[in-house]
Image (cartoon, rainbow, N blue to C red):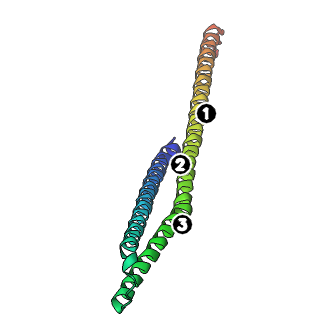
Amino acid sequence: MGFGGELRFSHDALLKLQDWELRLLETVKKFMVLRIKSDKDYASTLQNLCNQVDKENAPQLDYISNVSKSWLHMVQQTEQLSKIMKAHAEELYAGPLQRLSIMIKDKQQVKKSYNSIHQQIEAEMCKVTKTELEKLKSSYRQLTKEVNTAKEKFKEAVTKAPTYSAE
């Protein structure tokens, strides 16, 4: 019985560890989802900004100067950054976030499976120990009855037996 009692602590510790890992993975997933959303929103805002600048400056590009070249370069770099941010967000969604979601599902399944197996083992151990204990108690009671019956028969036999004197 002591063996099973000692395992209770490790079982509880393992369940706490599994719960902690699942909570951490869920937190990481939420972070990644928010990061992807933020990156997409940022990329979209940058692209809208560039589109707006293109509309406003299209007629004014007749005169080319260093300032206008710098301005066009900055707009192009911003547009390129927007595309990079959008691509990065899509890659993050398609790769790590999807794998993380699968890992969370796998960990949840492992935890469920572990709990199921643990409950089966616990039930079987309880059944075996209680059944065996009841069998032993029943056997002990039966043997006690037999011993008491044998003692009574012995006493009866002793009392009924003729006594011989040593004369």
Disc 2, disc 1: CB below 8 Å? no
Q: CA distance from mark 1 to mark 3?
A: 54 Å
Residue highlighted by disc 3: 91
Determine the residue positioned at 56% across, 46% down: 114
| Distance in Å between CA atoms under marks 2 and 1 | 30 Å
Relative to 52, is 119 above or below?
Answer: above
Q: Viewer-proximal residue, 79 or 94?
A: 79
- Picture layout, residue 114 above or below residue 137: below
Going from N to C along the chain, the mark reached first, 1 or 3, is: 3
Secondary structure of the residue carrying tag 2 is helix
Q: Nearer the viewer, mark 2 or mark 3?
A: 3
The residue singled out by tag 1 in the image is: 128
Amino acid carrying mark 1 in the image: Val
Q: Quarter of the image for the C terminus: give it.
A: top right
Coordinates of residue 162 in the picture (x, y in percent)? 66, 9
* Circles 1, 3 touching at the beta carbon (< 8 Å): no
Counting residues from the N terminus, which is met first, the one under dot 2 or under dot 3?
Answer: 3
Q: Is residue 143 left or right of residue 69?
A: right
Residue 99 appears at what percent x and percent y? 56, 59
Residue 153 drawn above or below residue 9 = above
Q: Nearer the viewer, mark 1 or mark 3?
A: 3
Check whether the beta carbons of the residues at disc 2 and disc 3 lie within 8 A of each other.
Answer: no
Identify the element where label 3 is drawn: helix
Where, by quadrant of the figure, is residue 91 drawn?
bottom right
Name the residue that disc number 2 marks: 108
**Separation (CA) of disc 2 from disc 3:** 25 Å
* Badge nearest the viewer, 2 or 1: 2
Q: Amino acid at mark 3?
A: Glu
